[in-house]
Structure formats: C-alpha cells, structure tokens
C-alpha cells in the first residue's frame, strides 16, 4: 500500500522479501527475493534505492543498520531496536514519563513465579521479541502456572520474558503519529480498536471516548515520536482504563493495521504521509472525512467459503471499500485484507462493515 501511494506521486519502488510472490512483489518495480538477514541483499536494496523504510518491526536490525550506512532509513535503526524488544521499549517509555502497565523482566522460572506473586494475578507473560497479533503471549491466572508459562514461551537467561499486570481496560485505542525531517508532527484521528484472539478485528473512528482521553492519547503519541526522534510514522497502541487513565501497550514504527482506515477516511492516508516524509515533501492534511470503520479479513473468511468469499455481496453495500493484499495462501488467523466503510455515524458504518464481512463469509 506504501508502494501504491508512492506510485501515484510519481515514485518508483523496490522491495525485499523472502517470498517470490509476496504482496510487495506485485506492486513494486523491482523485487529482491532474499531473507531479511541477507546483508548482501540489504546492500543491493540500498544500491537500488534513494531512501528506505521497513514494513514491520520483526526484520533484522543489523541489515537495517547496514542499509542506513549507505542510504537514509526512516524510522532509524535506533527506533527499530527500541520497538522490536519489549523490555527496551517499556524501559524507554518509563524513562519518558509515560505510563505503562506494571511489569517485571524475568529470566528464570523462579523469577517468573516471584514476579507473578508481586504483581498479582491475572498477568500477561510475553516474550521480549518476535511477538505480534497475540503471538508470544500467555495469560496466567494462577501463580502456580507461572513457571510452565515461562517455559512455554521459551524463556531463559538469554531470552527474558515480560510479566505484565493484566489491565482491566474500558477500551483499546491507537494513534498513528507522523513526524517529518524538520520535526513537524501530525497525528491521525484516534482509533478505537477491538481485538479478537489477540488480533485486531475492528477499528472505529472517531473513537467513542471522551475528548480528554483523545487529547491524552495524542499527547502521548507525540511525546513518544519526539522522544525517540522518529522520522516517519509511529503507531502507539494504548489501553484506556475504567478510571480514564491511558497506558501504552506497544509501539510499531510503521504504517499500522489500525491506521488502514485512513485510506478512505482521511484527507491523506498513513501510506501517502510516509511517502511524503521519505521524499522530503510537505505532510498532508490528516483530517477525518467522515466517520469510518475498518474490519479485518482473516483467512477464516476463505476457510468458511472453501476459498471463494462473496466479494460481490461486499461491494454491493453502500460506501464499502474492499482491500485484498494478494497473499498467496490463506489460513486461520492470517490477515488477508480489510473492508472499510464510511458513513454519517460510526454506529451506521459499524453495522454495514460487520454485515459486509458476514456476507463475504457465507458459502
């Protein structure tokens, strides 16, 4: 989607991915098939590019550093290293004075048990690296299960685990903050997010929370973008507690799933904004055009229809936009695309979005 936005502005693009027929290969001008830690391929990518970014944070940081020695990389390798390690991320946030759930870093089963007893059940235990969409996490509701949960997550002296207090939240929200080379910042409207099984299911904009909560979420996102010296985008996922406190859950230094609504919902999409920043153009207006709802399309939709969802039923609904990513195979829980619906109200858009996905899922 970034490559497609860049193309509309007259720019060409090159991608690097281990997959021969990955989504990026279908829309970029040149595709390099290589592992993310292939330093030779990283240098080739740099040679073919004027500026580089990354699509997700579970890439090889060393390769990104190699590229950064040859060409500008946005966000920088230092931002990537913070965001791909939960321990470093949480410590960095705490040092900036930003609220996070209570946590401990543990390196043994004994430490895990002690941390759970100190924080109190329930807790969420998370790997420090390589976790996304609910992966690398385990909810512990009995202190006696802490040791086995630590072991199940592959915890060790060299692979610490985060023990985090369970947040009884009222809702989850996120803010995508854009920051330019000269430090100008613009934040997209606050998104209210609903997760199912640890995977984003629905994004609702504007979020159905108070203006005070929205203002605090925006303030936090801008503080993080400035504190980490982000050039590009950073998405900040947050919990809103029942007392109205806003706590940061995690960061993503890239266009974010909860920001996909911006394609139809905002004057400038998150993808176009990143492209503008990367080439040194002025940032675009981030105003909301109308209430907007996005629902994800997981492989479950294909599974329930023997691989043939009813897209005509989706596109027959008013103000409905279908995005399919071109992934080569479907499986349960895999993000395959999304549906965005704009409307006069979020309630109306939400009804249509849910109905559209259900229509696609009917065999």
Image (tube, rainbow, N blue to C red):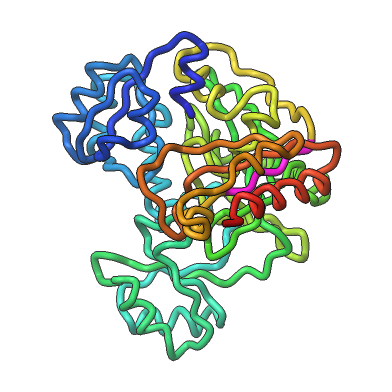
Q: Which residues are magenta?
A: 291-296
Q: Depth check: 223 or 127 in front? A: 127
Q: Depth check: 187 or 110 in front? A: 187
Q: Is residue 9 left or right of residue 176?
A: left
What is the chief secondary structure element of the magenta stretch?
Answer: strand
Q: Residue furthest top?
A: 10
Q: Depth check: 205 or 310 in front? A: 310
Q: Is residue 198 visible?
A: yes
Which quadrant would the C terminus be assigned to in this image?
A: bottom right
Q: Residue at x 50, y 72 (%)?
A: 124
Verify whether residue 294 appears in magenta. yes
Q: Residue at x 83, y 46 (%)?
A: 348
The image position of residue 136, as x and y in percent, is: 39, 64
Q: Is residue 152 left or right of residue 125?
A: left
Q: Is residue 323 left or right of residue 71?
A: right
Q: Residue furthest front?
A: 363
| Picture quadrant of residue 64 | top left
Q: Residue at x 50, y 88 (%)?
A: 142
Q: Residue furthest right?
A: 344
Q: Residue at x 77, y 42 (%)?
A: 206
In the image, residue 62 sits, relative to residue 32, either above or below, namely below
In the image, residue 352 sits, relative to residue 153, either above or below, namely above
Instruction: Give the total number of marks visible in the rendering.
Output: 0
Verify whether residue 75 appears in magenta. no
Q: Is residue 222 visible?
A: no
Q: Residue furthest bottom?
A: 144
| Picture quadrant of residue 66 | top left
Q: Is residue 359 left or right of residue 103?
A: right
Q: Depth check: 182 or 150 in front? A: 150
The image position of residue 320, as x and y in percent, is: 70, 36
The image position of residue 189, as x and y in percent, is: 71, 36
In the image, residue 104 sits, relative to residue 109, either above or below, namely above
């Amino acid at each position: 989607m970034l490559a497609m936005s860049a193309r509309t502005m007259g720019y060409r693009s090159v991608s690097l991915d281990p997959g021969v027929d990955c989504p990026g290969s279908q829309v970029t001008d040149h595709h390099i098939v290589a592992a993310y830690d292939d330093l030779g391929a990283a240098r080739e990518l740099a040679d073919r590019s004027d500026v580089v970014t990354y699509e997700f944070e579970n890439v090889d940081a060393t390769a990104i550093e190699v590229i950064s020695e040859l060409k500008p990389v946005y966000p920088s390798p230092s931002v990537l290293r913070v965001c791909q390690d939960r321990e470093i991320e949480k410590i960095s946030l705490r040092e900036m004075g930003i609220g996070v759930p209570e946590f401990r870093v543990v390196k043994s089963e004994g430490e895990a048990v002690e941390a759970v007893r100190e924080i109190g059940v329930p807790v969420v235990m998370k790997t420090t690296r390589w976790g996304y969409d609910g992966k690398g996490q385990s909810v512990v509701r009995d202190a006696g299960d802490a040791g086995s949960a630590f072991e199940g997550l592959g915890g060790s002296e060299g692979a610490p685990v985060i023990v985090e207090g369970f947040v009884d939240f009222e809702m989850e929200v996120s803010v995508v903050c854009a920051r330019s080379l000269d430090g100008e910042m613009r934040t997209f409207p606050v998104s209210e997010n609903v997760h199912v099984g640890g995977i984003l299911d629905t994004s609702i904009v504007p979020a159905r929370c108070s203006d005070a909560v929205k203002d605090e979420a925006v303030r936090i996102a801008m503080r993080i973008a400035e504190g980490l010296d982000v050039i590009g985008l950073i998405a900040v996922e947050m919990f809103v507690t029942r007392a109205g406190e806003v706590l940061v859950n995690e960061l993503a230094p890239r266009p974010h799933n909860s920001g996909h609504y911006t394609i139809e919902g905002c004057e400038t999409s998150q993808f176009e904004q990143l492209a503008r920043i990367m080439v040194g153009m002025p940032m675009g207006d981030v105003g909301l055009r109308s209430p907007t709802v996005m629902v994800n399309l997981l492989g479950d939709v294909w599974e329930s229809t023997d691989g043939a969802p009813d897209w005509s039923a989706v596109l027959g609904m008013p103000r409905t936009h279908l995005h399919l990513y071109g992934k080569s195979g479907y499986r349960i829980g895999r993000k395959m695309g999304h549906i965005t619906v704009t409307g006069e109200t979020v309630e109306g858009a939400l009804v249509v979005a849910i109905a559209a996905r259900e229509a696609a899922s009917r065999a």
